[in-house]
Image: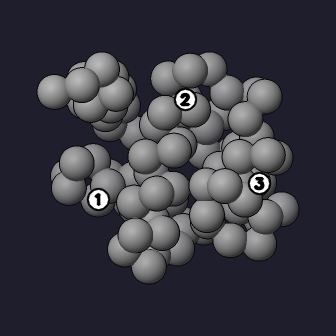
Amino acid sequence: MNHFDQLRRSVSRERSMLSDKLRTLLLKGASQAGGFDPDEVFPYIEEQLTQAEYLTAQLFLTWICENNLTFGHGNIQQRFAEHLKTS
């Protein structure tokens, strides 16, 4: 297991729900980007993220895109919980 995988697992285990800060940034970033692709969302939010938040957001947004899903104010925590169950 490489360093990225170890860090990913530890971050995923620590976060059963998104913090209010990260939830707000993901919603705003997706809105500004017009989608959920991490490459398009991160320019709007990355400077405001800690390393752990960055990794959490990267993994979550990648999972959203790979599974052709979306999220909004009403279901972002539910989508994040689904993401954690599959990682």
- Where residue 25 appears, as percent x and y from the top left, is 71, 44
Mark 3 surroundings: few (<14), some (14-19) or many (≥20) residues within 10 A: some
What residue lies at 40% left-to-right and 39% top-to-bottom? 17
Q: Nearer the viewer, mark 2 or mark 1?
A: 2
- Where residue 63 appears, as percent x and y from the top left, is 39, 60
Residue 54, by quadrant, is top right
Type of the residue with mark 2: Glu
Q: Which mark is residue 33?
A: none
Mark 2 surroundings: few (<14), some (14-19) or many (≥20) residues within 10 A: some
Residue 48, by quadrant, is top right
Of the pair 20 and 56, the residue shown nearer to us: 56
- The residue that disc 2 covers is 53
What residue lies at 54% left-to-right and 68% top-to-bottom? 71
Q: Which mark is residue 28?
A: 3
Mark 2 / mark 1, whichever is N-terminal = 2
| 25 sits to left or right of 72 | right
Type of the residue with mark 3: Lys
Can residue 26 be seen in this snapshot?
yes
What residue lies at 61% left-to-right and 65% top-to-bottom? 36
Disc 3, SS: helix
Q: Which mark is residue 82?
A: 1
Mark 3 / mark 2, whichever is N-terminal = 3
Q: CA distance from mark 3 to mark 2?
A: 15 Å
| 30 sits to left or right of 23 | right
Can residue 10 be seen in this snapshot?
no
Disc 2, SS: helix
Of the pair 74 and 11, the residue shown nearer to us: 11
Instruction: Name the quarter where the N terminus is drawn.
Output: top left
Q: CA distance from mark 2 to mark 1?
A: 18 Å
What residue lies at 72% left-to-right and 59% top-to-bottom? 40
- Where residue 56 appears, as percent x and y from the top left, is 46, 37
Disc 1, SS: helix
